[in-house]
Image: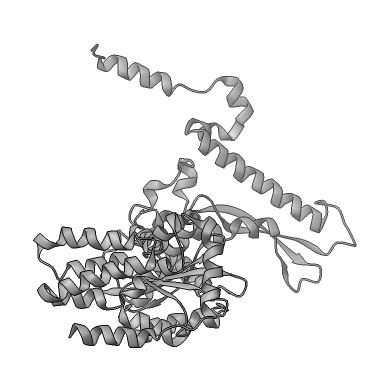
Amino acid sequence: MQTVSRRQVETGIEGVEESLPPRVQAALGQLVGAAKEGLLALSVGVGLGVLEELMAEEVEEVCGPRGRHDPDRVAYRHGSDDGEVTLGGRRVAAERPRMRSKDGAEEVPVRTYEHFAARDQLTAVVLERMLAGVSTRRYRRVQEPVGGEVERAARSTSKSAVSRSFVARTKEALIELMARRLDDVRLAVLMIDGVGLKDHTCVVALGVTTDGVKIPLGLWEGSTENKTVTSELLSNLVHRGLDVEQGVLVVIDGSKALRAAVRDVLGTRTPVQRCIRHKERNVLDHLPERDRDLVRRRLRRAWAETNHPRALEQLTTLAAELQRSHPGAAGSLQEGLEETLTVTRLGVKDKLKKTLESTNPCESMIECVRRSSRNVKHWQNGEMCLRWTAAGMREAEQQFRRVVGHADLAKLAVAVERELTLPQPNTVQTEEAAIVAAA
């Protein structure tokens, strides 16, 4: 490998930093300094100059040409003042022209300035970067190079300023999420799961439309093991227009409180699918290490079965065998056993069956929440947990794709509607009987 001397490196740097050609310097005039700092800095300088011209043109349209009397004008020039506009996640100085009404009673706004001075663009950039993992302390380091002069006068990039902007934006995200109307949304599936953030927990709801589109529906502070919390979340969804009369499949984890809340709020006839992944973990936790692989294989073989009676027979047989050697595992399996086969009973097959027999689609949204908030070291209160979770859910929504097997969702909706018209066994009594048998 050929080595490069220090003199050659210094000569190369000087070549890069040589001055611009005279013709370019003459064309750019006052922007020569910005051009030396890069194309982006040059573009910023040109943009600020164009902004000044646009504001001057608007003032002339309202007040008329300078130095000419116009009896029909509605306002007159009133000097200028220091102002700020939003630029790439920062506030930069810009001279703001002023106008007053013809009678001098009120100030006439400069619409061009108001548009570029709006803070919505600033808070949007802050939210995007924070959710991407940029901390408030390092916010300045990810800013685009806009020129030394502009950067020195920039504001709203300090840790506290970025934090305030992020809090304001996440509050808006929480309000928008919890106020979203659901009247025109035809859901085929409703998934509910919990997300834990340090010492705080939130229950989140994800909807899947008949077209396979995933929609974050809402959240509530608390655990899925708390019936009051889950009932409040479901009641909020119904209040916002969620229609369960047409039938919707509810996919939940293994929480008994959540199951009771679904029964109380959505009705006893609403079909419920227990997440088989949660059920599998709960059963295996009661077993010694040497027995777990065999039981896991038998569970998955039964859940992969497309024939409902045969699958139910396999699980029942396994529970009976476990009752003699590991009664704890048997009791865990028997609790809600039939509801782990709801999608099989409804005739769901292939890819859609694999999608709906667990809360994995909801887990992917929760993982986006965790990833977005990975830099948070201190969770101050539940309100902060709600804000971050709502922002993460909205971020996940931008990345959503239609669920795997969405082509069969219409068939699922028809199967659920058909089941609502048929007499069904009392699920509560079935579960209680299973618990008594386990005891």
Q: How is the image coloured?
A: one colour
Q: Is residue 378 above or below residue 222?
A: above
Along the viewing direction, whichever of 98 and 404 lies nearer the viewer: 404
The image quarter containing residue 389 is bottom left
Q: Is residue 26 left or right of residue 75?
A: left
Q: Position of residue 418 (x, y in %)?
A: 55, 74
Q: Quadrant of residue 193?
A: bottom left
The answer to whether residue 26 is above or below residue 135 is above
Name of the residue lying farthest toward the top? 2
Residue pictured at 33% horizontal, 56% vertical: 137
Total marks placed: 0
In the depicted structure, whether residue 309 falls above or below residue 49? below
Quick one: quadrant of the C terminus? bottom left
Quarter in which the N terminus is drawn? top left
Tell me, yes or no, if residue 261 can be seen here: yes
Residue 179 in percent (x, y) is at 54, 75
Which percent across, then down, holds residue 237?
A: 50, 78
Relative vertical location of residue 374 with respect to residue 278 in this rendering, above or below? above
* Among the 4 quarters of the image, the one containing residue 46: top right
Q: Residue at x 40, y 57 (%)?
A: 130
Is residue 119 in view from this perspective?
A: no
Residue 114 spot, x, y in % from top left? 64, 60
Give the residue at x 44% y 80%: 233
Q: Is residue 90 left or right of residue 49?
A: left
